[in-house]
Amino acid sequence: MKTTYHLKQFLITEKNFTVNNADEFIKNYKDLVRGFFETYPRFSDDQRKTLLSFLNDMEDPGMCLHGDCHPGNFIMSKGTVYAIDLSFFSRGNPLMDVGCFYCFATKMPDDVIRGVFHVEPEVMEKFWDIFLPTYLETNDPKVLSDFEEKIEAYGIVGIAQHASHLEDPYVFFDILDRDYEKAFAWYKKELANRK
């Protein structure tokens, strides 16, 4: 699938493109969501503590992030991929964009996928199923499964930026409440092993 290849090329370019001296004009993703995690009353104490810890521990290579990464925000013309809708553009860890795409493709309610992305949920999930092996350059089921296990946490943190701009971020909290324990199990285990 040509579009999948080009989205992969964009994300590879993105993860190899570092922003130098951009603190003044490109916000760090961590700074964009930290306040939401610290102050929004809907988080449980455990969720808040884990999300802030995860955010603080996340490697930050300062790379460009689209911030709203899904197939509808990339247009291909004459072999060139163009990113559109850069309202959440920031810098940070490129796994935030991949995680965002994962959550948009696999975690959103069907009506949101149809209404926001204008595709059937099965199409969005199929796009992810094609994208992931292309992005990771492997079809090894174990590698794909291990990656999905970890990327879900990045995705939940990734879509938090969207939720922080909504009056009622119910979709975000539905996903968080449903998937929190599973998504952050590997991270909590990692934290326990540090002690």
Image: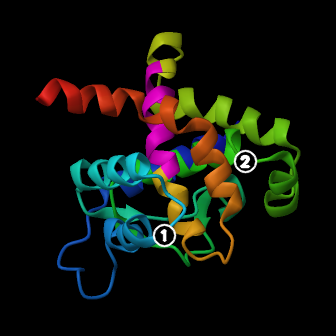
Front residue (pair 187, 19): 187
Q: Is residue 49 above or below residue 74?
A: above
Which colour style is shown? rainbow
- For the record, the magenta segment spans 146-156
Label 2 amino acid? Met
Is residue 94 in view? no
Residue 6: say if magenta. no
Residue under label 2? 108
Q: Residues within 10 Å of mark 2 (few under 14, many from 20)?
A: some
Residue under label 1? 40
Front residue (pair 39, 94): 39
Q: Earlier in the sequence, mark 2 or mark 1?
A: 1
Our reading of the magenta stretch's main secondary structure is helix
| Residue 165 at x, y percent in the picture | 58, 77
Name the element at disc 2.
loop
Q: Is residue 86 left or right of residue 185?
A: right
Which quadrant does the N terminus fall into? top right
Which quadrant does the C terminus fall into? top left
| Residue 194 at x, y percent in the picture | 13, 29
Name the element at disc 1.
loop
Q: Is residue 131 left or right of residue 60?
A: right
Give the residue displayed 33% in from the left and 65% down from the top.
30
Give the residue displayed 27% in from the left and 50% down from the top.
53
Q: Is residue 175 left or right of residue 143?
A: right
Label 1 amino acid? Tyr
Give the residue displayed 65% in from the left and 66% down from the top.
169
